[in-house]
Each structure stands twice: as structure tokens, then as C-alpha cells.
Amino acid sequence: MNLDQQRRYARQIMLTDMGEAGQQKLLDARVLIIGAGGLGSALISYLAAAGVGHIGIIDDDRVELSNLPRQIIHETGDIGRLKVESAADRITELNPEVKVTTYPIALTAENATEIISNHTLVADGCDHFGTRFIVNQTCIAHKITLVSAAIAGWAGQVMTIAPHLAPETGCYQCFAHPEAPEANTCLESGIIGPLAGIIGSMQALEVVNCILGRPALLGKIARYDARTMQQRMSSLGRDTSCAVCG
């Protein structure tokens, strides 16, 4: 770690459970972020600022006017641009040392292994139900820790999925079955903008925890209600009949 890095990350390094060794783990990490929207805006910003050394971003959408109240990584001048391009620009502005790989494509069953296996951790904030199951299955197959988050309306949730670290814990398919009706998305139920920042920041914190080797939400689901400012925790146990991890 050079002098500039020591100065940039000084307030993190001084934490007793971080130190230079912990900061070096962040610098060495390769995190794939799925979705450069509301959750991705906070997630990308804080991970880049914290010094995650390599960030991959996959999203095939372009910036729209209706995105801007919650997707604060993008600006009015970015309307029409690919979200991954706008997000990459923001990373460079925040921390030019961070290496960025952009994937302006949709994640599919055909390309998931090639993309995901190049990373040490995955943070999923996409708004497509089917994609979540592909991400879950691929991460389980390659024993890659997955931090998954979702928001809609006034509510959000974050969970960490890593049965390879704790066999008694479940995966995303233990939590939601692929044949179940898809949950409402922001497009259908609306969304309050700051909620994306809250849940995206919680997701970023959990990514940092995972990189440091102490996940706080492994086998747990943290749910947050923005109307009441209340948070509750529940367990995510393993379904022995699960086709993915059971």
C-alpha cells in the first residue's frame, strides 16, 4: 500500500478491526455488481470510495428520466447513455485507482458462468426475478459469496448467501421458488428514492464485511420498512429439498 492509499483510506485503516491488512483485502477484491440502478448507485459509489480494487458492472439498460430520483449515480446529462458507462465515469471521478469492467449486456444462463467466475464476490441488485435465480445458481456452483438486495415501494431487504461457508444456511431459491408469482417491482409498485440509498448502503456494508471475512447477514434476511424506520431480522435456513443447494 503506497502513501497516497494510506492517506485516502486513513479513517478506515484506523479502525481496530480493519487496519492495513483489512484495507489490502478490499484493494485485492474483485466484486461484480449486477444492476446499475437504484441499489447499484449507492453500492457502486461506496465500494469504489472504500477502495474495492476491481469492480465489474453488468446492466443492459440506458438511463431514463424516471430513473433519476433514486439512481443518483446518473445525471440529467446521462439520459440515453448506457448505465454501465455512466456508472464507470462516476467510479473514475470518485477513485481513479479502481479498475472497472463493464458488461453492457443482460446476464443470462449462457454467459453467467463466464462473467461471475471472474469475481471473488457478487452483489445483486437487479430488478428481474429470473436473473436472480441464475445469479444464485451460478454463485452456488462456483462457491462465490452472494450479497442480494431488493427494494419496492417503501420496503427493502438484504441477505448474504454462501452455503459453502455455512452449510446450514439457505440460498435464494430456498427463500423464493422460481415458480412463485414474481414480486412487485419498482415499475409496478413505485419506489421512494432514499430507500434505494439506504438498502444499497446496507448492501455495500455487507459486501465489505464479507471481504473482511465476517459476514453479518449470512443465513439472515434484514428487512427495512421506510415508513416506520423499523428493521427486523429473520433466518434463512436451508431447504433440504432445494434443487440448487439442498
Image (cartoon, rainbow, N blue to C red):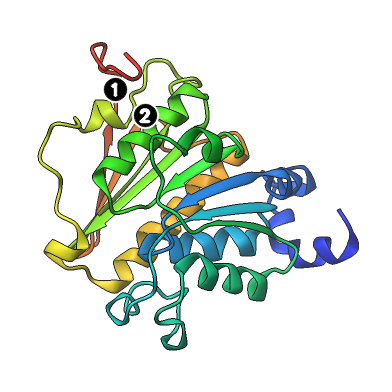
Taking 124 as reference, is 3 left or right?
A: right
Q: Is residue 14 visible?
A: no
Q: Which residue is mark 2?
A: 219
Determine crowd level at label 2: few under 14, some 14-19, many 20+ residues with C-alpha closer than 10 A.
many
Secondary structure at badge 1 equals loop
Q: Residue furthest right?
A: 3
Q: Which residue is mark 1?
A: 237
Q: Position of residue 130 (x, y in %)?
A: 26, 41
Do labels 1 and 2 touch, CB within 8 Å? yes
Q: Position of residue 135 (x, y in %)?
A: 40, 37
Residue drawn at point x = 46 percent, y = 22 percent: 141
* Disc marking residue 165: none
Residue drawn at point x = 20 percent, y = 32 percent: 178
Seen in the picture, residue 152 relative to 136 is either above or below; the reply is: below
- Report the front residue among 46 and 121: 121
Determine crowd level at label 1: few under 14, some 14-19, many 20+ residues with C-alpha closer than 10 A.
some
Residue drawn at point x = 46 percent, y = 30 percent: 139
